[in-house]
Image (cartoon, coloured by chain):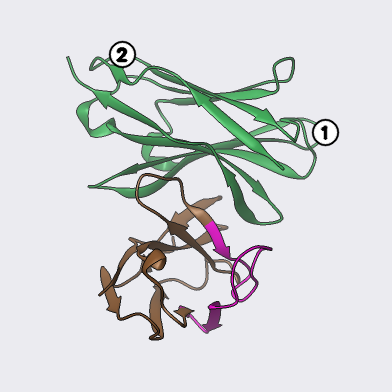
Amino acid sequence: QVHLQQSGPGLVKPSQTLSLTCVISGDSVSSNSAAWNWIRQSPSRGLEWLGRTYYRSKWHYGYAVSVRSRIIIKSDTSKNQFSLQLNSVTPEDTAIYYCARSFNGNLDSWGQGTLVTVSS
Amino acid sequence: QSVLTQPPSASGTPGQRVTISCSESNSNSGSDYVQWYQQLPGTAPKLLIYRNTQRPSGVPDRFSGSKSGTSASLAISGLRSEDEADYYCVVWDDTLSGWVFGGGTKLTVL
């Protein structure tokens, strides 16, 4: 049973960096068969995939075009976790952020979600 | 790039059968497989159907999926009040190398 536990601040000021962490239990961030995703949800944009990381002999990263210039996803094998950094945030980045595992072609495990509000 | 179109809302009475459609705009860049997710209020989406028709263990057989060409459907039979939720179709887009979500359908049980 895979469990993803998210943490991070719920309020970020405009132009600053949004940072969230997702701790994995029941699987490994360096698994050769899983990928680790960040997804957000807002009333205006619906569910939006932001990016992912996965390990296949080396680390791979993929990002959505909409945030590619502002996003960094990192993995930390020592803590079995992965993280999201989204730079230069604006109020349009206000959303519920989810981490999720993709395995066998499915987003089969999700974190609990973190509401992040961008406001001064 | 795939765009997935769902009706914004659907409704039914207890015991009825309801279907929710998902139309993919660009089959060339889309996956052969559609997934469906159920999102209950205040919770994360939950995988309901994968590979068009398959149910994960624990999902009741009242839920079923189908796909023909660029259209997929989720059917819920024997509708219950606890089925009231948002439902999303999702595909992997090879061109984007990313997940694409439908806009979601809010199901109301009258």
Indicate the secondary structure of the residue bearing disc 2. loop
Q: Which chain is brown?
A: B
Please, which chain is the residue tagged with disc 2 on? A
Q: CA distance from mark 2 to mark 1?
A: 34 Å
Tell me: B80 left or right of B110.
Answer: right
Say few, some or many: other residues with alpha carbon within 10 Å of mark 1 (under 14 / 14 to 19 / 20 or more): few
Q: Which chain is green?
A: A
Circle number at residue A16: 2
Residue A91 is a magenta residue: no
Indicate the secondary structure of the residue bearing disc 1. loop
On screen, residue A111 above or below A6: below
Which of the 4 quarters of the picture holds residue A24?
top right
The residue that appears at 60% across and 72% down in the rendered structure is B32
The spot of residue A99 in percent (x, y) is 52, 36
Q: Amino acid at mark 1?
A: Ser
Span highlighted in magenta in the image: B47-74
